[in-house]
Amino acid sequence: MSASLRQRALAEAVGSAALVAVVVGSGIQATELTRDVGVQLLANSLATVFGLGVLIALLEPVSGAYFNPVVTLAAWCADRRSGDGLSGRDVAAYLSAQTAGAIGGAILADAMFAEPLVRWSTHDRSSGHLWLGELVATAGLVLLIFGLGRTARAHFAPVAVAAYIGAAYWFTSSTSFANPAVTVGRALTDTFAGIAPASVGPFIVAQLIGAALGLALVTAVFGRAAPARTGTAPVQGDPELALPALPRPASATPPPGFRPEGQPR
């Protein structure tokens, strides 16, 4: 479908809000049902996997289902060489919508569980090994998203991105935020999924570095994307012509969103 910038930005806001509501809400629910931290994390990660997969499948045809500022910026950087992709105006609208949506999602989750609507988190996450975890989580997310695009496998995005975020909950020390907008939203809730405001800045820096590393890995593994061919329609299955599909992708944060070949941006 062809969507206006207003519709696409709204889809990004709604998707980001729903994603953070899933992350924060499932964390609150888990802590109310059990005191076992392992079970709490399992419940939180499973809810995020299912929620993210559904959101990507639902909103990808509208906006690409990015839901993640670092993925949006990575897509803009990667597409500048080919002259295709998001414009600067698109990027500004997407980043604003994603951040506003994430904040709204955290407030919504708190409201659903009768928590204070806005209460700064006291969950300190200021440590070098956590920043390294965020760098690894974000680099892997970007590698996955653009790798799928380069190999014409963007249709696997809902399952692949959700599965990666679910795994990264467990194999990274930071539980894989991998998403600056989600990180900001989670600072507003003093619950299981929260992050102290003082920890937000270093997390976002690690995510940006991770995104740059992820793009470098895409080039190293898959080679440089071929320039756009004027007058030639993309051929399904031709890796040189496949655009990097985008989310997002999470907690993370994603993650990240994908766009079918040939869809206007």
Image (spheres, grey):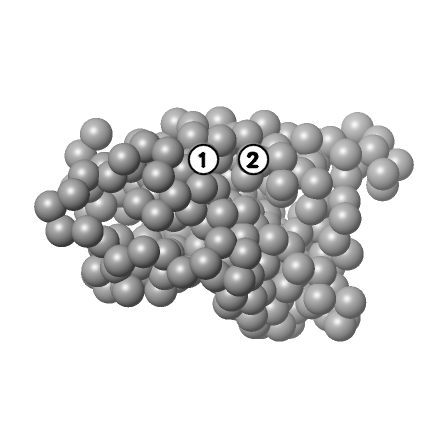
In space, the residues marked 1 and 2 are separated at their CA atoms by 10 Å
Left or right: 124 in relation to 232: right
Secondary structure beneath dot 1 equals loop
Q: In this view, does 81 lie above or below 255?
A: below
Q: Can residue 244 be seen in this view?
A: yes
* Residue at screen point 44% across, 55% down: 71
Q: In this view, does 201 lie above or below 196?
A: below
* Residue at screen point 39% across, 43% down: 239
* Residue at screen point 85% across, 38% down: 38
Per the image, the residue denoted by label 1 is 153
- Mark 2 is surrounded, within 10 Å at the Cα level, by few (under 14), some (14 to 19) or many (20 or more) other residues, namely some
Q: In which quarter of the image is the C terminus?
A: top left
Q: Nearer the viewer, residue 53 or 77?
A: 77
Residue 117: percent from left, percent from top = 54, 47
Q: Quadrant of residue 169?
A: top right
Q: Nearer the viewer, residue 241 or 140?
A: 241
Asked if the residue under mark 2 is in contact with the one under mark 1, i.e. CB atoms within 8 Å, the reply is yes
What's under tag 1, amino acid-wise? Answer: Arg
What's under tag 2, amino acid-wise? Answer: Ala
Looking at this rendering, what residue extends furthest in the left direction?
A: 231
Which is more foreground, mark 1 or mark 2? 1
Q: Which of 151 and 215 is in front in this view?
A: 151
Residue 86: percent from left, percent from top = 26, 55
Residue 59: percent from left, percent from top = 36, 33
Q: Is residue 4 above or below residue 126?
A: above
Q: In which quarter of the image is residue 151?
A: top left
Left or right: 257 in relation to 209: left
* Residue at screen point 21% across, 29% down: 1
Per the image, the residue denoted by label 2 is 160
